[in-house]
Image (spheres, grey):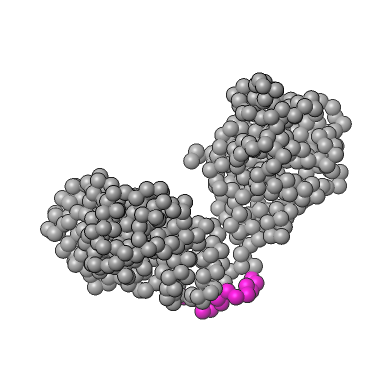
Amino acid sequence: MKRYFVVFSLVFTLVFMSLPSLVGHAEVTSKRMDGADRFAVSVNVSKEGWPNGSGTVILANYLAFADALAASPLAFKEDAPILLTHSNSITQTTMDEISRLKASRVLLVGGPGSISENIVSQLKQKGIQTIERIGGIDRYEVSFNIAQKLGQTDTAVLANGLKFPDALAIAPYAAQNGYPILLSQDNSLPSKTTEAFQTKGITKTIIVGGEGSVSANVASKVPNVNRIGGKDRYEVSANIVTQLNLAANKAFLATGMTFADALTGSVLAAKQNAPMLLMHPTTVPTAIQSLVQTKNIQDFVILGGTASVPERVFQILTGQAPALPLEGKTIVIDPGHGGTDPGAVQNGYVEKNLNNQFSLKFADKLQKLGANIIYTRNPNSDNFIDLPERASFANTTNADLFVSIHHDSNVSTSPSGFSIHYSSYRPAIEVNDVYVLSNGVKYPFIREETENKQFIVRNGSTEMALSYVGNNIAYDPTPSPAVVTTKALTDVFVTALAYPGIKATTAYSSTGIRDSNLYVTRWTNMPSILIELGFMSNSNEVKLLANPTVQDTRAQNLANSIKDYFNK
């Protein structure tokens, strides 16, 4: 991520209130196993689960989740902790823990590309002579070779080998039962996985993940399938508990965004007969909250530091703190112009400065309501970022809303008022049924040539180019869900932005709302709105626009309208 994309953390205001049906905070017990890094977390898990040492240690690459996905059942069988290493050297933290454990045997999971022969040399220098490598040409062969070291069973777990969450969520259950975790591709079953089913005589299969992870085609090639799916990784981890009717007197919590904490904690979870629940770093997944309530789980082990599973998120999960109205919502704020592009300069005011001032106040109001704020450019600095880069960055954030902040200008001093712009035509999402309106004629849309600033349309049996700089506008009469949300928000924004002396302008439409083809509203893939807060060219209005009290009130009203919309 480039340095000028500044991600602001959640700012929380704790207000005491009771939440019906959530476990009371007085009943909740928790233990956090954290550390300076994932190596330290794995060591602390090892100390907790094997206080008196262990003859065997499993060693896995801290970055290569693929090799380690299948390791938990083997670690449980060997009653061995899983520790982490770099590919070419063992950290002192990990080496010290191997010494404390008095381990005489180390199992390396992965080939020399994951754990080099230099690691073997370091271990031998420490006096460990029994070093076994469980490798393979790829992750599928590694999982096959791990499966061969497990006992006889008629059941196997099948998970996507290119994604870690599903396999790790079921790892404690698989470990306790001695089920191998075998790996699949999205839509095909690797030959080594097929061989594992055959050589181990597997007659029952637990598929973890929906058809987007393990397709129906793959499911048809394995015996007696019980699929545990869900709309996302968090729901899958909750459904593992409910569908398998697992005991949940205690639960382990780990971030669903990275694999290391869940991997190293999975064996300890299995030893303590506890499921592994995956958590989001900024919000409580609904499925996890529902499970905690239904099972009345009151005892938790939290894997990783507060950056992985924030204390605030844990408190909301367990009813120790209320969720704020916009908790879990991510909003991208796009302060218009900046750097070498000042925007409008009128009546002694510079647009980029006014955009920055309002954006900061708007962000503050949203953060106090619990929203996670991401800026396309830092309003506290003066950077220029072009429009494609703003839209492209916003599309990586998985945001719930994009709001671009601007101030308008005109050659005449008469126009006044704010306007709200959106795009029904959203080529970043889909272009079904799109047409271009030019001089009252509707032309079927073919494509956009952005570099030439042209719409290519069908004119009878031929193609024709229409410039989109001007009055030629593309429309989508069957808008996407993101546009439907956008349009609904524009209606509430009109009320929120009104202020004595500033009303919706009629310069663009009778309502102040306009379906436009502005770059950042058409090329983003979430609900997206561009606001012109008023006319800088109007000498009376610009004084209101620059007034901190007016800015603060309008920012609060705008934030409240977003809160009300998402909580209606």
Tell me if 421 is positioned left or right of 194 in this view.
right
Residue 242 picture location, percent across and down: 47, 70
Residue at left offset 68%, top offset 56%: 566
Q: Is residue 32 above or below residue 519?
A: below
As for residue 22 lying within the magenta part, the answer is: yes
Residue 347 picture location, percent across and down: 79, 31
As for residue 21 lying within the magenta part, the answer is: yes
Using the image as rendered, state which of residue 300 and residue 256 is in the foreground. Answer: 256
Quick check: can you spot residue 436?
Answer: yes
Using the image as rendered, state which of residue 460 and residue 168 is in the foreground. Answer: 460
Tell me if 420 is positioned left or right of 88 in this view.
right
Residue at left offset 50%, top offset 38%: 2
Quadrant for the C terminus in the image: bottom right
Residue 320 picture location, percent across and down: 56, 71
Residue 455 picture location, percent across and down: 66, 26
Residue at left offset 55%, top offset 76%: 23
Tell me if 344 is positioned left or right of 157 in this view.
right
Q: Is residue 528 above or below residue 455?
A: below
Residue at left offset 61%, top offset 67%: 322
Query: Over which residues does the magenta segment extend?
Result: 16-29
Using the image as rendered, state which of residue 231 and residue 313 is in the foreground. Answer: 231
The extreme bottom residue here reads 27
Quick check: can you spot residue 355?
Answer: no
Residue 391 quadrant: top right
What secondary structure do most residues of the magenta stretch adopt?
Answer: loop
